[in-house]
Image (cartoon, rainbow, N blue to C red):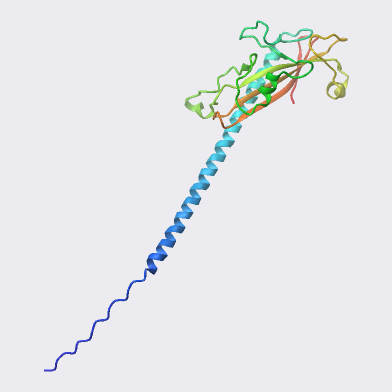
Amino acid sequence: MNAMTRFPRPLPARPRGAVLFVALIFLVLLTLLALTASSTSILQERMTGGMRNRQLALMGSESALRDGEFSLWAAPTGEESALPPCGFGLNTTEICQWTRINGEARPEVLAFRSSRTWDTAPAGSYEYAPALHGLSGETETASLASQPQFLVEGLGLDMSGYEGMMGRMGSARLQEAGGTGPNPKRALYRVTSRSQGGSSAAAVRATESVYSMYTTNNQSNPSGS
């Protein structure tokens, strides 16, 4: 009986980890793609939110501006002023105008018009009547952080008369309230409004228009700019 010859079994090759290395590379690539997609989505969401806040602030500012113009339109027309000056025993229900000092706007008015933050409005500024903040239900998405406000500033009397468009706009001669002059035709007012967006720190928009009111009758002529 012949003895069976046994051959040694070959040892398995030592694993070198190539598959694991490739899998780790793909895992890192997928992680980078996921992070990139997530950051892009967050950036787009922030851009959309900022645009929404700016649009809401503009909407509130325009609404308050029209309310200020309507207050002028509804005010009784006088020879020098349709509205009394601010700060002279007025109650909170009366609309007043800020008179200029030596032809210059008051510091309170300048701060109201140009401040980048939502500072406290000066006495004599008014909130837009319909509530646009704290909304709920179907209108909650249009809620503003604070009520829009407007301020009326008296620019003076227009002494140029009615002589054509250049006489109205190009060569207007202003006479401040309280002065004297021949036959003043119109009183000029600047209405400035401002509003926040849906977030208090996101956007503040300011809008203004110049409103002219005839002093010889009860008609008014708005002129926006």
Using residue 147 as the reference point, say whether residue 89 is left or right of it. Answer: right
Give x and y (percent) for residue 5. 19, 90
Direction from residue 100 to residue 63 in the image, left or right? left
Which quadrant holds residue 128?
top right
| Residue sitting at the far left | 1
Q: Residue at x 70, y 20 (%)?
A: 107
Residue 79 x, y percent position in the rendering? 79, 7
| Total marks placed | 0
Name the quarter where the C terminus is drawn. Answer: top right
Residue 118 x %, y %: 60, 25
Rendered image quadrant of residue 199: top right
102 on left or right of 207: right
Where, quadrant-wise, is the N terminus in this rendering?
A: bottom left
Judge from the rendering whether residue 153 lies leftward or rightward of residue 14; answer left or right.
Answer: right
Q: Nearer the viewer, residue 118 or 80?
A: 118
* Residue at 68 percent of width and 26 percent of height: 114
Vertical placement of 153 versus 29: above or below? above
Q: Residue at x 40, y 63 (%)?
A: 23
- Does 195 sit above or below residue 125? below
Question: What x and y, as percent, mark residue 94?
Answer: 64, 9
Q: Is residue 189 above or below residue 46?
A: above
The residue lying furthest to the top in this view is 89
Q: Quadrant of residue 181?
A: top right
